[in-house]
Image: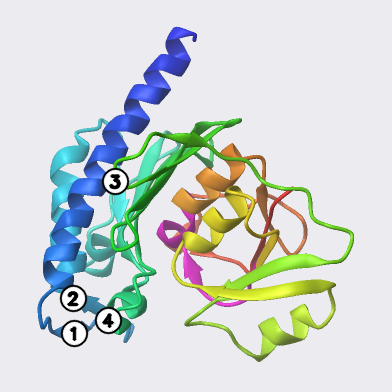
């Protein structure tokens, strides 16, 4: 393995450790009768979001700027310039967290040249972690097991296995799905949808509706590392560092 790959692997291992530490803090709140509050955009937030973000920001220890969801909601957004930066969603799927269905994640991604090149998605309630170090280097670890390489699958001739948002599916999404060949439709929360494509459990994930860059960057990194891609409805790769950090509608694709 080249020194660059070793460096990327070591960095990914460090980010995995940070995400899993944040996940333990999230689970400590999850097991309690926690309170839910509303942010200025009416989206929910809990103590778990804030505790996890503090842990990540304290431990990341990077020279690059960090754009994190709860800090951004409070107006604390660093100047990212044109160089690398980090995107952090300390608890993606807060509605799933509140609903206690386990489908929430910790997302941390490194953006280089406008695209996520390294990312970690940790699902603490499911005890599984996905990460990517770069092209062809995507992995999954379940519990205390060993890291397993993952890759997208080639869709079958009988149609696509499509995954859609559990909390944000709408009429526009249903209209889109009516126009493609769907063999099976599954629902999932948070950035786990990207990971289902990355591990070859699904083929296609359309998202019509508002998302922010910190919602998608880590999942996109994992999917890209596994051989998939994320594009907007014009076919352009979903890029990062956009004004306001808001994404257009997009489609995540497997093999």
Q: CA distance from mark 3 to mark 2?
A: 21 Å
For mark 4, what is the residue? 98
x then y, percent, for residue 143: 31, 47
Q: CA distance from mark 1 to mark 4?
A: 11 Å
Question: Which of marks 3 and 1 precedes in the sequence?
Answer: 1
Lateral position of residue 104 relative to residue 211, left or right? left
Give the magenta-colored segment's residue range.
206-217
Q: CA distance from mark 1 to mark 2?
A: 6 Å
Q: Is residue 145 above or below residue 41?
A: above
Q: CA distance from mark 1 to mark 3?
A: 24 Å
Question: Which of marks 4 and 1 precedes in the sequence?
Answer: 1
Q: Residue at x 27, y 69 (%)?
A: 73
- Residue nearest the observer in this picture, 91 or 25: 25
Direction bottom: furthest residue? 171
Q: Residue at x 78, y 65 (%)?
A: 160
Lateral position of residue 156 relative to residue 213, left or right? right
For mark 1, what is the residue? 37
For mark 3, what is the residue? 66
- Residue nearest the observer in this picture, 232 or 47: 47
The question of residue 222 being in magenta is answered with no
Is the C-beta separation of discs 4 and 2 under 8 Å?
yes
x then y, percent, for residue 66: 29, 46
**Front disc: 4 or 2:** 4
């Amino acid at each position: 393995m080249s020194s660059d790959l070793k460096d990327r692997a070591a960095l990914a291992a460090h980010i995995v450790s940070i995400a899993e530490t944040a996940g333990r803090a999230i689970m400590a709140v999850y097991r309690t009768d926690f309170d839910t509050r509303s942010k200025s955009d009416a989206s929910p937030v809990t103590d778990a979001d804030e505790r996890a973000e503090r842990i990540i920001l304290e431990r990341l220890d990077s020279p690059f700027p960090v754009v994190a969801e709860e800090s951004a909601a409070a107006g604390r957004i660093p100047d990212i310039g044109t160089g690398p930066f980090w995107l952090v969603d300390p608890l993606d799927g807060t509605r799933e967290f509140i609903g206690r269905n386990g489908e929430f994640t910790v997302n941390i991604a490194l953006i280089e040249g406008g695209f996520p090149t390294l990312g970690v998605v940790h699902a603490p309630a499911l005890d599984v972690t996905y990460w990517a170090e770069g092209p062809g280097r995507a992995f999954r670890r379940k519990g205390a097991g060993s890291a397993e390489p993952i890759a997208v699958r080639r869709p079958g001739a009988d149609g696509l296995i499509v995954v859609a948002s559990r909390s944000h599916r709408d009429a526009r999404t249903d209209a889109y799905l009516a126009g493609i060949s769907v063999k099976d439709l599954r629902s999932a929360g948070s950035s786990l949808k990207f990971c289902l494509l990355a591990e070859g459990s699904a083929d296609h994930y359309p998202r019509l509706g508002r998302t922010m860059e910190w919602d998608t960057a880590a999942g996109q990194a994992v999917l890209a590392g596994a051989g998939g891609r994320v594009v907007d409805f014009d076919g352009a790769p979903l890029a990062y560092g956009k004004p306001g950090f808001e994404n257009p509608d997009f489609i995540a694709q497997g093999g």
